[in-house]
C-alpha cells in the first residue's frame, strides 16, 4: 500500500468526526444558535441522540434514517455531509505529500460542503464561519512554511487579493453577489494560491463553468435567477476540484491551448 493511501485512510476517521460536527454548524450557525449546547437531539421529539447513534454515517444507517425514540425521519443531509467532509479531508492527505501543507488544505476542504449547504438553504455564508477561517488557515500555511513545507507564500497573498478582489468588483458592479462569496473566494485564493496560482485559476474556471451550467438549468426549469443555486456553492465545488485535481487539469488545459 502506498504512503498516499495510508495517509488518506488514517485521515478519513478524523474527517468523518469533523463532518459530524459540521452538521451541527450547518444546522445551528445560520440561526445564531450555540454550537455546543444543547447536545444533539431529535428536532421532532427533542430526545437526545445517544452516543452509539451519533457515529458518523454508520449511526444513520443503523437507525435506517429514523429517530430511535419517535421514529421521525432523519434527513439524509446528515450522513451525506459527514461522508463528503470525510472524503475531502482524506483526499487532501492523499494528494499532498507534505503533512504540514495537507493540514490547511484539508481545513479548507472540510468547510466547503457546509458552506455549500448553508448557502443553498439560507443564501448566506456566515461571518462566524469565514472570519475564523480567514485567520486560522493562512496562519497554518505560514507555520507550515516555517516548518519546511513547500508553501508558496507569495502565491497565497496573490491568490487572496486576486480571487477575492475580482469577486469584490463583481459584487460592486452586479449587485447580485454577496460579500460572503467575496470572503469565501479570498479564503480559497489564499489556500490554493499557497499550492500555486494555477490551482486558483482552475478553481475559478470550474466555478464559472458550473455556475453557468446551473444558471442555464434554472432558466430552462423556469426558476429564473432567484431560483438558481447561490454562487457560493459553485465556488466551493470549484475549490474542491482544484485542490484534488488542479495540477492535471491545468496541465491538460495548457497542452490543449498550445496545441
Image: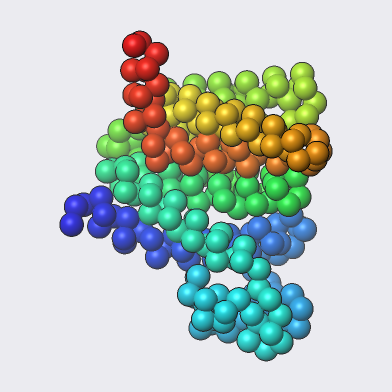
Image spot of residue 78 (x, y percent): 60, 65
**Would you place residue 117 above or below residue 47 in this image?**
above
Residue occupying the far left of the picture: 1
Residue occupying the far front of the picture: 220
**Would you place residue 221 above or below residue 75 in this image?**
above
Which quadrant of the structure image shows residue 34?
bottom right
Report the colour scheme: rainbow
Image spot of residue 156 (x, y percent): 45, 28
Residue 164 is left or right of residue 228, and the answer is left
Q: Measuring 76% from the left and 58% from the top, which residue is drawn there?
A: 32
Image quadrant occupied by the N terminus: bottom left
Residue 13 is left or right of residue 94, and the answer is right
Residue 139 in view in this figure: no
Residue 68 is left or right of residue 154, and the answer is right
Nearer the observer, 195 or 212: 212
Residue 201 in view in this figure: yes
Residue 114 is left or right of residue 220, and the answer is left
Image spot of residue 120 (x, y percent): 70, 48
Nearer the observer, 157 or 52: 52
Amino acid at each position: 500500500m502506498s504512503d498516499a493511501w495510508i495517509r488518506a485512510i488514517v485521515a478519513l476517521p478524523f474527517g468523518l468526526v469533523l463532518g459530524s460536527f459540521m452538521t451541527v454548524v450547518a444546522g445551528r450557525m445560520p440561526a445564531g444558535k450555540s454550537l455546543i449546547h444543547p447536545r444533539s437531539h431529535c428536532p421532532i421529539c427533542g430526545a437526545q441522540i445517544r452516543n452509539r447513534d451519533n457515529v458518523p454515517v454508520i449511526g444513520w444507517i443503523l437507525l435506517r434514517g429514523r429517530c430511535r425514540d419517535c421514529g421521525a425521519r432523519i434527513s439524509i443531509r446528515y450522513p451525506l455531509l459527514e461522508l463528503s467532509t470525510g472524503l475531502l479531508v482524506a483526499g487532501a492527505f492523499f494528494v499532498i505529500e507534505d503533512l504540514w501543507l495537507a493540514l490547511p488544505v484539508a481545513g479548507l476542504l472540510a468547510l466547503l460542503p457546509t458552506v455549500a449547504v448553508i448557502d443553498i438553504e439560507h443564501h448566506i455564508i456566515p461571518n462566524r464561519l469565514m472570519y475564523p477561517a480567514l485567520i486560522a488557515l493562512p496562519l497554518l500555511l505560514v507555520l507550515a512554511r516555517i516548518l519546511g513545507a513547500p508553501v508558496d507564500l507569495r502565491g497565497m497573498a496573490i491568490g487572496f487579493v486576486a480571487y477575492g478582489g475580482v469577486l469584490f468588483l463583481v459584487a460592486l458592479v452586479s449587485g447580485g453577489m454577496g460579500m460572503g462569496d467575496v470572503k469565501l473566494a479570498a479564503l480559497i485564493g489564499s489556500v490554493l494560491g499557497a499550492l500555486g496560482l494555477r490551482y486558483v485559476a482552475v478553481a475559478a474556471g470550474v466555478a464559472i463553468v458550473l455556475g453557468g451550467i446551473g444558471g442555464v438549468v434554472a432558466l430552462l426549469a423556469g426558476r429564473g435567477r432567484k431560483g438558481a443555486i447561490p454562487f457560493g456553492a459553485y465556488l466551493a465545488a470549484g475549490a474542491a476540484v482544484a485542490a484534488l485535481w488542479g495540477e492535471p487539469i491545468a496541465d491538460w488545459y495548457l497542452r490543449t491551448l498550445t496545441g
